[in-house]
Image (cartoon, rainbow, N blue to C red):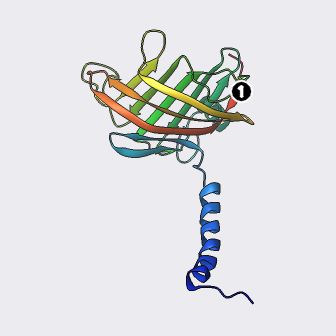
Amino acid sequence: MIKMKGWNKCLLLIIPFIGVFATKLHTNWPKAGVSVYFKGEKRAFNATVRATKNGFSQRGGLSRNYLDTIASCLYTSSGFVEILRQDHPFEPTLGIALGFEFDENTPEYPYFPAKSTIQLRNYTWGGVEFSANDSLNYTGLTNAVSDDVFFEIQSFRNDTIEGRFSGLLLSGSGDMAQLDSGYFKVRLYRKNR
């Protein structure tokens, strides 16, 4: 019979708990949607656009499927992705729009888009967007001229795209705001445009 020291017995009791904890970490991936740190606070944008709380108020207007499609779209002809999310489905205060060029046939990841844009919208703002006194709505882009935002596409499988983003956004009045540790995981709908 093998005699065990006290610390060995403790180790045998602790190992199963470590295994359970590690499994929880591995399977507890971030849920779908968009999240980012904005002005030092973590913001979650997990809701897609909805017409009203009690259904759609337009006759022959926008269906839920149409709203879902435009909120998570891969334009196959132009190779561009648009993701629209807000912080609440029916009474949002903030919304975010991500757009970036993307080649779905890229052989390896990470993929870094050459053109991209981020817009952050405050729905409580009633003024003219991006006017000189608009300090509540922000935008940033990356292209051949400007390099305000950064995107890294980490994977694209079964029409679900996952990646990270960050950047420095500007308002109409010239105020700047930093976006840090942005993350998105969204199922895309294909559209020919």
Q: What residue is shown at x 32% (from left), y 31% (from top)?
A: 177
Residue 79: image quadrant is top right
Q: Quadrant of the N terminus?
A: bottom right
Q: What residue is shown at x 62% (from left), y 79% (from top)?
A: 13
Q: Position of residue 86 (x, y in %)?
A: 48, 39
Q: Is residue 3 left or right of residue 177?
A: right
Q: Is residue 110 left or right of residue 164?
A: right
Q: Is residue 87 left or right of residue 75?
A: left
Residue 61 visible? The answer is no
Q: Residues within 10 Å of mark 1 (few under 14, many from 20)?
A: some
Q: Is residue 87 above or below residue 123?
A: below
Residue 158: image quadrant is top right
Q: Which residue is mark 1?
A: 190
Residue 52 visible? The answer is yes
Name which residue type carries label 1: Arg
Q: Count the numbered circles shown.
A: 1
Q: Position of residue 22 (x, y in %)?
A: 61, 61
Residue 181: image quadrant is top left
Q: What residue is shown at x 55% (from left), y 29% (from top)?
A: 152
